[in-house]
Image: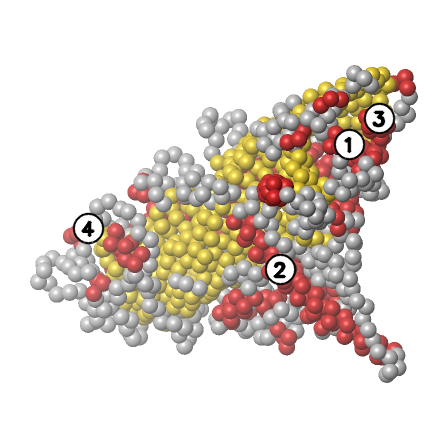
Amino acid sequence: VTANVKVRLFAKNLSPDKINLSTLKGEGQLTNLELDEEVLQNMLDLPTWLAINRVGCNKAAIRIPWTKLKTHPITLSLDKVEMEMSTCDEPRPPNGPSPIATASGQSEYGFAEKVVEGISLSINSIVIRISAKAFNASFELSQLQVYSVNTSWIPSDLRFTRIQDPTRGEILTFKEVSWQMIRIEADAIQSGGHETLSAPIRLITNQSKIRVTLKRRMKDCNVVASKLILILDDLLWVLTDSQLKAMVQYAKSLSEAMEKSAQQRKSMASESSQGASAPPSAQPTRAQQSATSADQNANMAKLFSAYDVCETSHHLQITHLDLHICDDIHSRDRVMNKRITGGAMQLSFSSITLDYYPFHRAGENCLHWMHYSEATKSREGWARSLLEEFRSSVDMLRSAVKDHQSISAQSQSSPTTTFSPPSSPRAQLISSSFVLRMADFSIYQVSTADQRRSSPKTMISCNKKSLYLPQEMPAIHAELTEYYYPDGKDSPIPCPNLYVQLNALQLVLDPRSLVWLNLFALDLKQSLEQFMELYKLDDSQKPDEHVDIRVDGLMLKVTLIWTQEGAAHADLPRSISVQMSEMVATNTRHSPGCSRSSLESLLSAFQEEAFFSFPSTTSFPRDKDSFPVLHAVFQRHAYEQDTHLHDVYRGLVPASLTADALKMPAASDLWALHFSQFWVDYEGMSSGRGRPIPFVDSFPLTLWMCQPARHLQHRHRVTGGVSTTLQRSDLGSLGPSPSSSSSSVPSSGEHPDVQILVHVQKHLSVQMTHLQYVFLLRLQHCMKELQLTLQQDLQQPAGDRSTQRTSTSHRTEPFSACVGILVKSAEVALLLKPVPDGTAPTSSPMGSDLSPSDSHGTIEAGREGGAHPENPPGPLVERTGAEMCPVDQLLFHSVCGSLDIRGENTAVALDVGQVRPSQLGNVSLRQYLSNRSLGSGPVVNSGTGASGPEVKVRLESGPSAAAHSPLSEHNGFLQCRLHALSADFLMSTLRNLGHFLEDDSASQVLPMEINIRDIHVNLKDDGPRDSASDPDPTPMALHIDSLLIHRRDDGSFNIGRECLSCTLSLSHCVLDVDTCTLTI
């Protein structure tokens, strides 16, 4: 009878001729079954963007072990099941209650429920066909089985497939679903109206399984919580770029319907479905219980707790995934030509887990989550801080709404009328979280058929093993969380948040791979735009919502490689690596070094420098068209003047308690990046014996970024054109206030798209040899060529799109950016070519006292030169032997700089308060490097001189630089002003510097203008003497009052005063120091 009832629940149009049942034998057979679509939808709890249209089965058989129903399951065997489904543009009505729960009549969990729950199912073949607006898909499963298992996931006696806790009044049951193979296919819909060129997608997987744990209430059999785990073994998938484009297009066509369905599901979620840390519903127990029964209950309760499902969750586990993406050179849908044809890239991922918790109560702990780790704990603390800030903001907003309503009520009613704000019910805020973990992965550099056969090199990989990090530490951990009220309450909801942790990742910037990836991404983007236009899927009007983001990084590394042609010196570096110990990147203010007070301190440090203050922001080395480095958006954020609550209290926006009341757009994001230790090394040098050689010693680094143009346009929309201008009185004196009419949207040309502040608080120490200097020149040339290549590829699809259609969403103005940098003090150590013993000075110049002189354009005698010993910090690098090397240092104080980008135009401005050279002479390289690691930074007088900065530099490139000379547009134009600079040099140092700057490669002509005023240079001849009794050479003091140097496009130099100049011939020249002129 029970079996007959169950069959009639799922089948429709069931007639006696389709049933062959032998009750006594416990066997039955049904043919040509047509199943009820709505009942199946409710049982499977399908998402409402998907609907079942038809389900049929050709043959079904049932076997009932009448005498062993307590221990053996009823077996249901189906031959072939065919299902037709379709997607819904608008969500269909939500699913009803499960038919199994309906059939039980909400009765107490008993024998009949145990029998039905233990049914095992086997299906030889399942074919599912799905029709969507843009494509058709099919799923074929073979040898599917559903059976009950014990806690070890092994089929066993039915009595051991459930755990019952009478005290809680709940029961756990365990089921497993397995299949031999699944075949997935998808192909675009071809219609007469248009021709869709899309490659079919195919994926075949081997044996897989799903493990299901259900927790029910015993009093009514309702499911309280469930856990579903999909386990996939090793996967190998080869995709062409055409197939990948098809996948993205299909996913895009479903995204809108899936988003609407998810919102419907959240708004109708019931309290009973949440199940997060739900208190046990104790059942009435017998008054008299024996001691044995109590012990059994205690043991069952302990066992129940060990396998308890605290809340509903879904999980995906993939042991290993190998994905190969390659060019489809025969594809007809290619929209752009590629520089590299036949390229392929391999992506290898190990131990991937994806967890989904749809009904977690916001703010509660996650200790019961699968794979709970230190990363989850870090995210938990950060998210809790965000929730506390949100709840505080809600209280303040509620108070503002109450005050506003009180004022409105008093103005519209009599004085005796009292106002009572409506009380809002206390609903439980729910969060839904996706958690992605990846134990290890490798993305390899692009390879082509014409390359020499060799093992692939990694482009992105995890380096946990060599850094001795715990193996259980994931390479990538990411959590995305959204919030909602289950009853659809229209009350303020927190912004979604995304937490990412990156551990021991290293990126190799291979130029060939970057070019291929750039073209691949552009091709994918353009084909997606064409697809969206074809199917009217334009989502450009959707608001770009803010998401709270935090990215933590541990031991990250970026490597820039230079591929040399032909043989190279053994000590010439092959690459340069940028590394960081700990990194935090966030657009929230709840991370170390990224708070509003940290930003306020940074702004104060910048404001102390005249370079960043008005009117210096419009004078050389900057100009009147330069962007203000200290944009008012930064200070608004530092003093919390850019929040919604601030606008409410100022009366700029109305106060409300709607769901989006406290949400902000992504345009208002202000990002902070903090690196606790940041350093740069050379790699690939033979002298390093496989170890890196230091280039820039470790230092803390802080960056702040915002989008002023988008931010101001957003404020104009929010306030309706009222007070959109950032007033000086509100923000302090950061420079000239942006001038814009309150009745018009501020032009993006007045404010950069991206604004960045870079602050180096501690001493910056750099060192290099001649070969390292040559390598940096080669690397700079390589990076410039890569930049030009990427830029040309970016312009190619942009031109194609402009001919295809005109869209208001595309940019009409070129990209613009402004970067400001502040370094308190810096040091550059030049490790020069060793000086032979015969020419070395008899005593080290470290003990001499060469000091600046006060000469006035003449050479004076009787002064000795030298330098003060310095012991700058730096890491100890192992070197063999007592290698002697002259070391010259350039000590800088108060280094201020800016970078302005307007389309193709670039301007770099640099301002140095003080520059002091220091010659250490021939020293032991090992001892010098040891002293760098143990000593302190050099002492440089703080502040600039009375006459201002000693060095000012400006470098322009792009079309705007053509105003200086035609060649400047391509090679750039350099302007340098040296003022009141004092320098002490040894003659051997000047000779050695010439060798240091030598470069065999053909150098480009850089047009320039150098203006020198009031320069004092002290020279000491430390060359060899004929005999030890000869007196020391007379030191010289050179004073240059005024000198102007021009370099033309043809490479010639013009040297003279500001109005008088002459052309420098490299054949012969004589210096007359009395008049400071050159005789040609």
Please tell me whether mark 2 sits on a helix, a strand or a loop: helix
Q: Say which of 359 and 868 sits in front.
A: 359
Q: Mark 1: which amino acid?
A: Ala
Q: Residue 653 at x, y = what percent?
A: 75, 68
Residue drawn at (61%, 28%), measured in percent from left and top?
154
Q: Secondary structure at mark 1?
A: helix
Asked if residue 62 is positioned above or below residue 97 in the image, the reply reads above
Image quadrant assignment for residue 381: bottom right
- The type of residue carrying mark 3 is Val
Q: Which residue is mark 3?
A: 1
- Quadrant location of the N terminus? top right
Q: How many marks?
A: 4
Discs 4, 2 touching: Cβ within 8 Å: no
Q: Give whichever of 1008, 314 is nearer the camera.
A: 314
Q: Within 10 Å of the Cα at label 2, are there few (<14), some (14-19), or many (20+) other Cα atoms?
A: many
**Which residue, as the protein is rendered here, is positioned at the far bottom?**
415
**Mark closer to the chain start, 3 or 1:** 3
- Residue depicted at 63% across the width and 41% down the height: 293
Q: Is residue 17 above or below residue 399?
A: above
For label 4, the residue is 836
- Residue drawn where x is 60% and y is 46% of the image: 368
Left or right for 907, reference 93: left
* Labelled pair 2, 3 in contact (Cβ < 8 Å): no
Q: Is residue 458 left or right of residue 729?
A: left
State how far apart marks 3 and 1 are (Cα).
Answer: 11 Å
> Of label 4 and label 3, which has the lower sequence position?
3
Circle on res. 112 = 1
- Which image quadrant for residue 8? top right
Residue occupying image coordinates x 62% and y 59%: 386
